[in-house]
Amino acid sequence: MVDSGTVGRTHQTADRTSLHRLWKTVLAVIAVTLAVACYFAPVLLIAVGILVALLLCARLMYRDRDRYIPNLYARDVRLYDDAYQEFIATTLREIRRCRIAGHPLLWEAARLPKRTSDNSGELLLDLGVWIGWSTRLTADATGRTVYGFDTFSGLVEDWQIEDQFVIKQGTFSLSDPLAQRFIRDTGVSLSDGVPAALGRDVHYVKGSTYDTLAPFLAQRPGAPIRLFHMDLDTYDSCLHALETCKERFVEGSILVFDEYLVTNGELRAFFEFQNRYGLEFRYRAWGLEVGEMNAAMVTTRWKRATYYLAAVAIHLLDGRYLWKIFSRRFWRFWLGAPVGDIAFMLGAAGLRKSVSLEITGLGTLDPTRR
């Protein structure tokens, strides 16, 4: 593992998936243990076979397929209008061809052209950075300047996630105990409440993007946005950022949304935005959220291992897709989700809701069409 203070990481290390390789090893050990137990206790093999057969039969009879995005808290998409339902269905069909093991943000960053005199004016924006590792690692992968935006005092508004729960305003503040621990363990320092660059070519902009994003762009007239990473979480913040940046998007702009597969959040905001202006785009990657990379930046090997083991243990104990058997959402996932989605979701000790796309046509935002 490369030390967190080292600049210039290679593209091969950019995805930061050590935790998830450990998780897959744990699943493999569990599978082997179960196989050995079945060998020595054939009655157990019969029981497992019956359970698998019942599950397959139930999947054949399940009627609610395609009504839900493949996560445990998605709402019934039939609550939305026909146009949005079709957008969701199309999105799922297309991103299933774009699965990656790692983080779409770093995957995309590693594929951007390096800095040249021709592209030096392009903007790489990271909106919502917490302690700043997404910004720093993007700078490492691109070799270019990256601008990170955050209040550093938490969410500016409540974040309603589907119809399940609310993350309150102020959550994710750098004063929170979890943030303080990550700051300490990843070697980050703060100056006036803003994380240090740690040798990277990054610049942090403190404050709500409702207040800071437009003035930032005004100071850089005509500069196109090459990379736009959305991690502000809420629908309102996402839509505001898209609208504020609309004149700077160009054909080839890469947009990465960290919690895209939340139907009342970033997904809804982008649907409305692209529909309003007739944007053309193509999906490029579906993978891990950026928050999963933080543990990989812990500077001490034994502490990093502790973080990994704790994450795996929490994932096992929490259950997620494994054994919340008294939850209707659990059965909805196992009975209704495509087998490929189930395997993809089970393959990570974390969340896979991040999606990247490329703008291929500007629609009415094209100045030549006005």
Image (tube, rainbow, N blue to C red):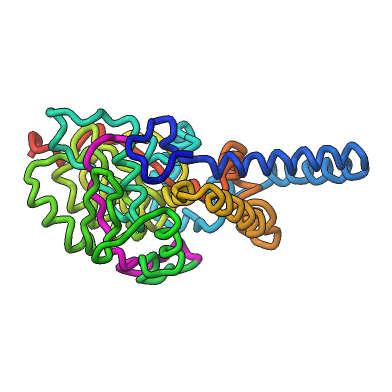
Evaluate whether residue 332 shows in this view: no
Residue 266's spot in the image, x, y percent?
Answer: 35, 53
Residue 144's spot in the image, x, y percent?
Answer: 23, 37
Instruction: Determine the residue positioned at 33% across, 39% down.
Output: 7
Residue 111's spot in the image, x, y percent?
Answer: 33, 30
Residue 142's spot in the image, x, y percent?
Answer: 29, 35
As drawn, 102 above or below 211: above
Whether residue 146 is in magenta: the answer is yes
As drawn, 93 above or below 171: above
Whether residue 240 is in magenta: the answer is no
Instruction: Determine the residue positioned at 18% across, 49% down.
Output: 245
Which of 27/262 is in front? Answer: 27
As drawn, 206 above or below 147: below
As drawn, 32 above or below 275: above
- The magenta span reads 141-164
- Choose top left, top right, bottom left or bottom right for residue 204: bottom left
Compared across the picture, whether 318 is left or right of 251 comes to right
Quadrant (top left, top right, bottom left, bottom right) of the C terminus: top left
